[in-house]
Image: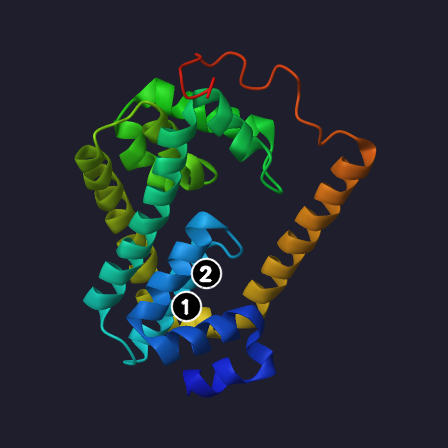
Amino acid sequence: MDLLAAASSDEGGITGFLLDLIDSLGPIGVGIAILAETVVPPIPSEVVLGAAGVLINAGRMDLIPVILFATLGSLLGAVFFYYVGRALGPRRSHAFLDRLPLVETEDVDKTFAWFERHGRAAVFFGRMVPIVRSFVSVPAGVVRMPIWQFLLYTAAGSLLWNSLLIGLGVALGDVVYDYLDLIDYVIYAAVAGAVVWFAWRRLSGKHRRPRDAGKHLPVDERDEA
């Protein structure tokens, strides 16, 4: 099967577009897609890395450069949120995340609680946990975790997670190709459901940030700036 032709066709949908983008830009395209997904998650990283695995399976890219650029993209996105937390402090960074579209106070609380419970290990293991994966860098910045430790744990966790997903894409290349349309429908349904849910929360007034959100967090000079 010619995966490039499939990616250029309308039948591929979102996954077809990703295949086309990654096939055109190579490993750099994978890194850019993962960076974008980390900072403003539009598409699950599982889809991006799975699509990359399909192209590796087809012989269009090499495994090692794809893993390295995907990990670099994850690392750069994590560094962005690390410095958000470092600059804003506990309460202001909590409010920053809490006001992002489609992010609930409970999700932010879960991320901060995960870090408080697991400490520095949360940066490593958090790279493999949905929701926590996107924002665990913020509390690491809040507590001013040494940057070299943060980079080490983030790189190690991202390398493991990315390698696993890319490896699955390589191993299941033909299977993934056969189910491109189904993957698209799942993504469309998830996005549509998220938009409807967000609109309902907004219109019903339930999306308002609770007055006590983040009040359990300590106050420091950054919160008072």
- Quadrant, the N terminus: bottom left
Q: Is residue 23 left or right of residue 104?
A: left
Residue at the location (47% across, 88% down)?
5
Compute the Cα span from label 2 to label 1: 6 Å
Residue at the location (55% across, 76% down)?
12
Q: Which mark is residue 67?
A: none
In this orientation, does residue 172 appear?
Answer: no
Relative depth, front residue between 216 and 13: 216
Q: Is residue 218 left or right of residue 105?
A: left
Compared to residue 192, the image places residue 122 above or below, namely above
Compared to residue 89, the image places residue 178 above or below, namely below
**Which residue is tagged 1?**
51
Q: Which mark is residue 47?
A: 2
Where in the figure is residue 198, as x and y percent of width and height? 71, 42
Asked if marks 2 and 1 touch (Cβ < 8 Å), the reply is: yes
Where in the figure is residue 14, as x and y percent of width and height? 55, 69
Relative depth, front residue between 57 and 215: 215
Residue at the location (53% across, 55% down)?
42
Where in the figure is residue 165, as x and y percent of width and height? 34, 56
Compared to residue 223, the image places residue 3 above or below, namely below
Mark 2 lies on a secondary structure that is helix
Q: Quadrant location of residue 162? A: bottom left
